[in-house]
Each structure stands twice: as C-alpha cells, then as structure tokens.
Amino acid sequence: MYFLIKKLLLILLADSVICWEPIELNQWHLSDLKGLRNISIQVTSPGGIYTDLENAGLIGNLYDGFNDVDLRWVAEIDWVYKTTIFPKSAFDMKFRELEFQGLDTAASILVNNHLIATTDNMFRKYILDLTNIPAQNNGEYEIAVIFTSPVNYARDMFGEQSKDHMVPPDCVPGIFKGFCHANHIRKMQSSFSWDWGPAAPSVGIWKPAYYFGYSVNDKTRILDVDWETKLIDRNDQEKTNTFEIVFRIGLKTVPDFSGTLTVQVSFFVEEKSVLRKNVTIPPNSEFFTVTMDPFEISVNDSNIWWPNGYGEQKLHDVNVSVLASNKRLKQSLGFRDIKLVEENLDKGKSFYFVVNGVSMFMKGSNWIPAHVLPEKVTQEYLEDLLYSAKEANMNMLRVWGGGIYESDQFYELADKLGILIWQDFMFACSMYPANEPFLQTVSAEVYDQVRRLKKHPSIALWAANNENEAALRTNWYGTDSNFAVYVDDYKRLYVDTVSKVVKEQDPSRPFLLSSPSNGVVEDESECVSHDPYSVFSGDIHYYNYRDNNWDASIYATPRFASEYGFQSYSAFEILKQYSTKEDWAYNSKWIKHRQHHPDGDIQLLWQIKLNMFVDEEKLESSEGLDYMVYLTQIYQAVSLQVQTEHYRRQKNTMNEKGEGMTMGALYWQLNDIWPGVSWSSLEYGGFWKMSHHYAKNAFAPTLVSPVLENNIVNVHILCDPDLNYPLNLEIRILKWDLSEVYTQTMQLVDYCYEFIVYSKSLSDLMELGDCRAGTSDNYRLKYCFIEFNLIRTDTAEVISQNTIHDPPNSLTGSGDDAALLIQKPNVVIHSISLSNMITKDQYVESYDIELKSESLALFVWLQAFPIEGTFSENGFHMTSTSKIIQFNAKKYTDVEQLWQVLTVRAYQPF
Ligand code: BMA
C-alpha cells in the first residue's frame, strides 16, 4: 500500500512538473559593469546593491557615521546581476517566460545574450516572453540584468526632458545631502534623500523573480484576483448586511490558446458559496480579465470587517481556480463598505469617511518607508510598527507618495489590524514630466499597483500625489513664469493617466488628485485649484514652526488634517549605535549631518525655550546630546497632543467663519527611516518616542480634552467611537508639593453628544485652589497643577487623563519665580515585579514598576534599552507619591535584567 501511494504521489508530482514549471531566480552573481571596482560576488534576491555589498563585507552599514555620503559611489556606477537556470524541460515547454515582480530600476535584461527588455520603473511587474529565445545547448538560460546608475539615468532623463522644457526642481536643498532629479525616474523618491532621510538610490532585484514554462497542456495561469464589495442593505434589528460583491480574475493565457475556460470562486461566509463562469477567450488575448457576475450575500455583523476600535477584522478565505487545470489562488476577503462624504455645507464641503454605514473620525499618521533599503524590512519589524499604530488607537495610516507602494505583507497586516490605508501614488513634492514614455510607464505602474492592492479591505482611498498641486499653485519651484505648461503636464499625468487608470480598475474607492486638495474633483480639468490648502473642503497639511506650538489657538481648523507634525531627536541610546564618541554632543558635526530640515535645530531650540527651561551649561556639556533628545521629545509630544486634540475638538462644531466639522487627524510621521532627527513618533527600530505615548492618549476612544480659550477653561469630551459608559469627570488641583487643594467630581450623562461638559474661568478655578504666589500676584496656572480624570464608574478605571498645557510658561514655568514653586523632582524606581496582567498581541510578559516621588514631577520618562517593550504610560506627570506602570516586554527578560537597565528621569525646571 505504502509503495502504491508513493508511486501515485511521484506520478502526480512528475505531472505537475511537466505541466507547470516555475523556478525562482534567487541566486545571482554580482559585478560592477566596467570592472573598475573589481567586485565579483555571489548574492541572493530579493535584495539590493547596498545590502549585497554589505553582506559580502565590502562596505559597512549604510547608517553608520557618514556612510550615506561616503558610499555615494555605489549609486554612481552600473551593476550586473547574472544567473543561469537549467529548466529540466526547457525543450519540452511550448512557452516560456520570466516574471520580475520588481526591478530597481533602469535595467537591460539579456537572455543568452539576446536583449529581451529594458525596464524603467521600480513599481512595475515585468512579464517577459522567452519563447523565441533558444535555450543553449545543454538547455540553459543565462540571464543578465544590467542596471544603469539611477543617479546618471535620472540626470540623463532630466537633460532629455529639458530639451523641451525643464521639469523642476533641478535639485534638492543642499542640507538634504542628496542626489538631484529623483522626479525623472520611477523609483522611491526619498531614496535620493528627503528632509528626514539619507540618499541611497539602490539598484537590484528587489522583489521575487521567476521562470515559468508552459507545456502543451497548459492554457493559462492565474495572475491575480480582486473584488469590490458594496453594502446595499442593512437590517439593524437582525444585525445583518447585504453586500454585493464582484470578483475579477486576471489570467495570462498562452499565445495560441482560444476557447472556453471555467473560472470558479468559492468562499465560506455563513455558508459555502461557489460562483462559476464560463468565459470564451479570443485568440491572442494573452492577458485576460474575467469579471464574475455580481453576487449578493447576507453577512452578519459578526462576520464583517471593521476598522480598529469599531469591531473585529473578520477575514475569510477565497479560493479561485480555473477548472480542469491545476491553477489555484487563495486570498483573504473582508466585507466592508467605504464612502467619502462630501456634502455641501454653508461654506465649502464636508470631508469624512463612512465605513459600514458608520461615520468615523480618522485617527492616525503618515507612513514612510521603514528603511531606505526595502530588503532590510522584515516581517517582524513591519508587525512591530503596525501593532504600535494599532496600540496608539489609530484607525488610518497614509502611505505617503514619496516612498514605495508597500509590500503585500504590509497591506495584509493592515487588513488584520483594522488600519485603513490612504494610499498615495508615488509622486511627491516635485513637478513631473508628462512626455510619452513617462506617461506610458506610469500608466502600467498604476495598473499593476491597483490590481495588486485593490483586494485589501484596508485600502480606503487613492490619491494621485503628495503636495504637487500645492507646489504648482504656490510656485515652490518657480513654475509661475510658465504656469500653463506645467498645468498641462499636471493634467496629462494625473488626470489623463493616473486618474483614468484608477477609475477603470477601481471605481469603488474615492480618488483625489492630490493631498492636500479640495477633495474629489468632479470636473478634473480644473485640477489645480485656487487654494489647495482651503480649510473649507478636502484635506490640509499644516506646519507652523514660528508660533508657540503648545498653543492650540495657532492651528487651522480644516475638514481633515492629513499632515501636521514636529521634529524630535532619536533616543541617545539609538544614536549611539551608529556614531562614535566625538559625535555625542549637541551641535556635533554628525548630529548636524542628520538634521536635514532647513533651520531645524534653530526652530527646535526656539520652540523649546518658549515653554521650557533650558540649562545652557548642560546643553554644552557631555550630557548635552542626551539632554537635547529629552527636551525635543517633550516638545514634540506636547505639540502633537495639543494639535491633535484641537482637531478632535472641532469634530462636531462649526465656527462663525464656517470652519470645523474636522473628521481626521493624521500626523506626520509614524515611523523613521534611519536614526537621526525627524518628525516620527516611533524610533528607527520601533521603540516609542514620548510622542507616541502622547498620540495614544490623544487618540483615546473616549478623551477628556481641557483647553484654555479666552481665559476660560473648557473641558471637552470626545468619543470615537461613541461609547457611553457611566462616567465621572474628576477635577483635581494640586500644589507642587503634591498637596491636593481642591477636588470636584461630576457625573456625566450623554457626554458623547455634549462636547463641552465643564466651563469655568481660569481665575475662578485657580481661586478654588488658592493658586497664587503672594497676595499681589494674580492667580496663575503655573502656581498649581490641574488634573482632569475621566473615570468609569462601573470599574473605577481612569480611561483618560489630561492637563492644560497652554502657554505662556503654563505648566513648566521657568526662571526665578518658578524655582520658588516647583521643587526639583526626585523620582525613583521603588520596585519591579513580574505582573499577572494578561499580555496581549505582540507582548510575552509584563512587569509592574513602582515609582515614588516626594513632589510633583513632570514628563517622567522611563527607558529600558536595550530590552524591547512598551510602557503602559510614559512621559506622564506624576501627581501622586507612588505610581505603578507596566512594562510589556516583547521578549522574555527578568527582574534582575530590568533593574540593571531601567532608568527614570523627570523634567528639571531650573
Ligand atoms: C510634508 C511631507 C514631507 C515632509 C514633511 C516634513 O509636507 O509631505 O514631504 O517630509 O512635510 O517637512
């Protein structure tokens, strides 16, 4: 019996080899084309040139020291990747092809010395016919991919384009230490440098590559499957939803095939559904899309897909097959409906998302490439970053247009974690060419990416570019003198090309021509609006480094904020790993090298001094860098909180100017590309900066948000989603020695719909706490600390805690009078023990850390480097003599180890 089964198995296997022969091309020989560097090494793919050279020990880590500029030569020469395959049945196979899922970027592909293709776009998939290329005598194919230096290629394309008219910018600002003309090559734009990242324009086979052989019996292979889901009815009582779903299956048929195929789609949701369609393929179709007939299905609430915070993310397996062949594909399906609502308001239009019939405030951030070299981004790292987004109560991330269309794993994780994706196409902060070859490659790129990504329930919206409309309208690059020409380019690229392909391939999602913009444009011929930054419609990007960033009144009040943010330095412990001792000073050459934002350090110091005391001596001392890290992280955290809460408070309000009804806050930027100075709330490597904790609090499902407006303290409650627990609002006034001088507790009813639940003039409130220095001095915020707590009355849990940060010198005081009031805090770690708190998601164990303090301490900051994990709270104000915090560890550790590495610090007011 055993032998019989084995024999059967062998026959089956043999059959599948003859019918269908994919070979992965992942072993390569790499050399520099002209032999100038004498490099000749074995490498693997997917990968990239910097990593290949580093793995061979020929260069160091790109992020060490000044390597980003020292290794510029890597991007300035041409490289060759070669491999040889011996398809067992090369001669039997009737048709043969190569599939490159991603080549970075400008390359010539030779097979057995025949040039079979040239490539010019990192974001395209290339399927290349080999049928007419004879295998060599012994049945082999030698495949060579010759990459042109992307820097030289972009410069040449710029030159070509300039013969007609110049497409600016002609280079990035000098402080970026970058390469010019990224806008002339279809490649990760930020790999030529950005205001937060290094220049490292890689080359290589960055995605999987395959050889396919088709036998005489083979007719087709399944390339992809996607679908559109639409909610057509909902029964609130029974909690069921009727969805219409339309599947599309992309086939690649062999050149000589014509005839009928039967395509089947099956899935199990409530019960099994099997859909079939017979399709007649005309001769010479090659690429053929089968659109299944619309199918209606009733899905219970428990089986649909919800964004984070609103419900579960139910995903169901879908199996697609071509009957009477061995071609199958399996995918995950989520039922959800999404709409962008732009209704006329008194002034302008609304701009908000409705998912499964529920309108939602979008809470989140902007995503940039997790590394300038995509091959360095592991599944584990992606998970870590995206779990951190989820944990910070986010429900949307914007994949920004200067990076890459992210990997399949990224979107699978977003589906799994309930994070909606605002997907830009990869055009950012530039004018772009609109010559024929450029438009053609973009058209293919958009087609490939929409086909690849459309199936993900997480994708919420497509946007054609980042800031290019604003750049054109407000003349960032001197385009005004030839405005009509650049508008024409703009229209040809985004309207006639990107928009056209997106609308053909995915009419189910909203499409924006740019971000920021005035929203979906009905008549796209008016593609460059009068004011892309208008607060009355669409989305805005808002940065202001002049005015006090802790003052909520400086911020604009838009319909949707898709970018806003503040810089901070990476943790000292992280910076240290990539530098040497002489670099560890505030103002060192190396730190300046990592600051790419023009005037960035001047702005940081200015903003810090507006609200905090800066010990100049300490700044110049050997502790200066560490000190600056801490101050910048406080500055960033509070600024982000103030602006985010400002947006949330405008959710249900409209002021007399017609501003308000804000329905989204996506701050700039979630993650870091390298260790340095940037707007990120997560460190390079995934540790949380202080701002990530503040973002988590500011995005809390139910938030208490006090604000000082014209000397009145207004306390708002924001609910996203609407969760009406029985709640108490507690107002505590404390002196700096921690004596509690006043407490008031109010029971809240229907708070999700009340917005302002408490209002009192600051001086009246301060008087209750007797908050003044002497009899002649006014009641002032800095003489006392006011804490606002939202407490669930059923569980006694504090679900949101807040204070007032409003300037001037509100909380943190400075100078002599502050010294009279604020005591030098002395926070100590009292005990560490393994907690029995249940850990979740990516954590394996949790520790209780008890802190003690004799006075009020601000911005208490715990670190446990190098142990990976997250604190339940961090950067908080200690308003009691003892406090217990959890440290959630990602890998197993122990109490001893934690005692060795754990540090705590607090803000020193003088
Ligand atoms: C924005 C972005 C990025 C930039 C950031 C910070 O407007 O679109 O281009 O990195 O600001 O300056």
Image: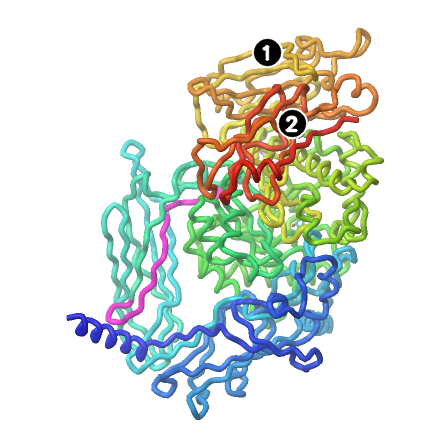
Which region is colored magenta?
322-346
* Residue 801 appears in view: yes
Residue identifier under label 2: 828
- Identify the amino acid type marked 2: Val
Rendered residue at 67%/34% (across/down): 639
The colour scheme applied to this rendered structure is rainbow
Determine which quarter of the picture holds residue 148.
bottom right
**SS label for mark 1:** strand
The verdict on residue 327 being magenta is: yes
Residue 68, how many percent across, how many down?
71, 61
Residue identifier under label 1: 743
Q: Is residue 691 found left or right of 614 in the rendered image?
A: left
Compared to residue 601, the image places residue 14 above or below, namely below
Determine which quarter of the picture holds residue 179.
bottom right
* Residue 659 appears in view: no
Residue at the outermost left position: 1
- Identify the amino acid type marked 1: Thr
How far apart marks 2 and 1 lie (CA) works out to 27 Å
- How crowded pointer 2 is (Cα within 10 Å; few <14, some 14-19, many 20+) is rated as some
Residue at the outermost front position: 896
Residue 266, how many percent across, how many down?
27, 57
